[in-house]
Amino acid sequence: MKKALVTSLLLFMLGALSAAAPPPQFGRTPKGDSTRLLTGRVMDRAENPLPNAVVYLTNTRTRAVKTYIVGTDGTYRFPSLQPNLDYEVYAQFNGHKSDVKTVSQFDDRQQVSVNLKIDNK
């Protein structure tokens, strides 16, 4: 009887373990992370990168602003953005400004790419 109880308990535990969620697959974002990532490049009209341009990201609800100074390749990155908020993004370089682009809360992509062009002539 004791052996049958131990066997039943082991089978129950194995069943419970097999019902647990599978481990996350490589390259997939865990379901608990619902934030968004905004990336892009700052370029001139000829699509050359503009190193040291400054990218401005504005939360349209709070009007809080984050900045990013791009490197030699012209890329920028804003991680951990809230999916239920709208953001505005633009860049400045040598006194010239790109158009303002909107990252909408209705765009359900987890990673959004917005390239910004500046006419610096």
Image (spheres, grey):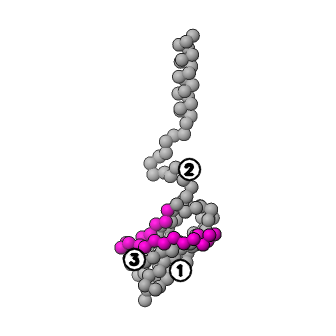
Q: Quadrant of residue 87?
A: bottom right
63 magenta-colored: yes
Amino acid type for the residue under numbered disc 2: Gly
As displayed, is residue 13 above or below residue 100? Answer: above
Amino acid type for the residue under numbered disc 3: Asn
**Residue denoted by label 3:** 52
Secondary structure found at label 2: loop
**Residue denoted by label 1:** 99
Horizontal placement of 7 versus 94: left or right?
A: right
Marks 2 and 1 sit apart, C-alpha to C-alpha, by 34 Å
Residue shown at the point (44%, 82%) measured from the top left: 93
Mark 2 near mark 1, Cβ–Cβ under 8 Å?
no
Marks 2 and 3 sit apart, C-alpha to C-alpha, by 35 Å
- Closer to the N terminus: mark 2 or mark 3? 2
Q: Quadrant of residue 16?
A: top right
Residue shown at the point (47%, 80%) measured from the top left: 92
- Closer to the N terminus: mark 2 or mark 1? 2
Residue shown at the point (48%, 77%) measured from the top left: 91
The x, y position of residue 85, in whole percent, is: 61, 65
Secondary structure found at label 1: loop
**Quadrant of the image containing the C terminus:** bottom left
The nearer-to-camera label among 1 and 3 is 3
**Residue denoted by label 2:** 32
Looking at the rendering, the stretch of residues picked out in magenta corresponds to: 59-79
67 magenta-colored: yes
Marks 1 and 3 sit apart, C-alpha to C-alpha, by 18 Å
